[in-house]
Image: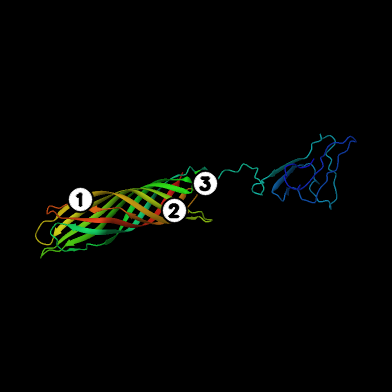
Amino acid sequence: LDCLGCTRLSCLRFLSHLHSPSGHYDEPEILSYAIPLICSIGADVRHFATQYPGFGRAQSQPEQSLAPPAQTPVTPAVYILTTNVSTGGVSDTSNTPKSVENTLSGFYVGGQLLPAAAQIVGRELKNGRGLPFENGGEDLDTTIGLGFLAGYDWRKQGIPVRTELEYAYRFRHDFESIEVTLGNNITYKDDLSTHSIMLSVFHDFSTSSEWKPYVGAGVGWARNTSSTKRAPAGAAADQTIENSTDNLAYSLQAGLRFELSSQWIGELGYRFINFGEVETGTFSGGDSVSADHHLSHDIILGVAYMY
């Protein structure tokens, strides 16, 4: 019988062990290959002829009788030939478990530590008196925040992006403004905190390593809450007020994600985010402090768990 399955050149050929009318068994035509054979086009040849101890020797070796015992029914040798033509390799007939990656749903949750350099831009003192205002430009301060996120990786759907919904809280950003008056300066000390919810889209670049660079952008909502103490230099009493401003926020981000295990992902990145306007509210004297932009330059230290 010819081995069937090779769609290209035949790799080997054996005569069947069929009982002939004369009462003997045909001798197999044995090519000079060892058994089992690996076909050059990727065929995996296996045989079921263990009862023939000489089967599989080259022609140069002494031939042995391949006939089974007389009382044993004649059983043709069985050859299994499987070919993986699409990949040019040997197909795996074993029940290999799917990889963990293939069984993941694409959903993930995570957390982030967000050390940052926060910045107040375009500050203005509003009091109607037209007095000089110090520290009226930019004010930079180091802050820290915490983020919690949930996302979905669309690569399982053939789309090389991730979408992510993140809530973050940023602790106090301190900045100070001084109104210069004749012999009685007024200092405004502001502790600014921010809540934000951002919807972001990321593109992960494919690499041959466990480190995957990405870029992304986001848009969302931010609430800047300003707790401001107005402290005159003289005998006048201090006054503290609190005010919140809701704004449209946007962000740009880039970084690296890396595999900690089959389901845990680490992240190191940078993000620029604009939280919008800041307003202290109006004090009893009619004065207030405002800023056009609350900016943050985040270092992202994150971890995510893939489901």
| Disc number placed over residue 132 in the picture, else none | none
Q: Nearer the viewer, residue 219 or 162?
A: 219
Label 2 to label 3, Cα distance in Å? Answer: 16 Å
Residue type of the residue flagged with mark 1: Glu
- Residue 171 location in percent, x, y? 29, 53
- Residue 12 location in percent, x, y? 77, 47
User: Which residue does the numbered mark 2 point to in the structure image?
Assistant: 266
Q: Nearer the viewer, residue 94 or 150?
A: 150
Rendered position, 9 above or below 140: above
SS assignment at label 3: helix
Residue type of the residue flagged with mark 2: Gly
Q: Residues within 10 Å of mark 3 (few under 14, many from 20)?
A: few
SS assignment at label 2: strand
Label 1 to label 2, Cα distance in Å? Answer: 37 Å
Q: Nearer the viewer, residue 88 or 12?
A: 88
Image quarter of residue 46: top right
Residue that lies at the very extreme toward the left in this rendered image: 235
Q: Residues within 10 Å of mark 1 (few under 14, many from 20)?
A: some
User: Which residue does the numbered mark 1 point to in the structure image?
Assistant: 242
Left or right: where 66 falls relative to 243: right
N-terminal-most mark, 1 or 2: 1
Kindly indicate whether the residue at mark 3 contacts the one at mark 2 (C-beta within 8 angstroms). Answer: no
In front of the other: label 1 or label 2?
1
- Residue 75 location in percent, x, y? 79, 36
- Residue 151 location in percent, x, y? 42, 45
In front of the other: label 3 or label 1?
1
Q: Nearer the viewer, residue 89 or 273?
A: 273
Label 3 to label 1, Cα distance in Å? Answer: 49 Å
Residue that lies at the very extreme toward the right in this rendered image: 22
Left or right: where 124 falls relative to 4: left
| Disc number placed over residue 101 in the picture, else none | 3
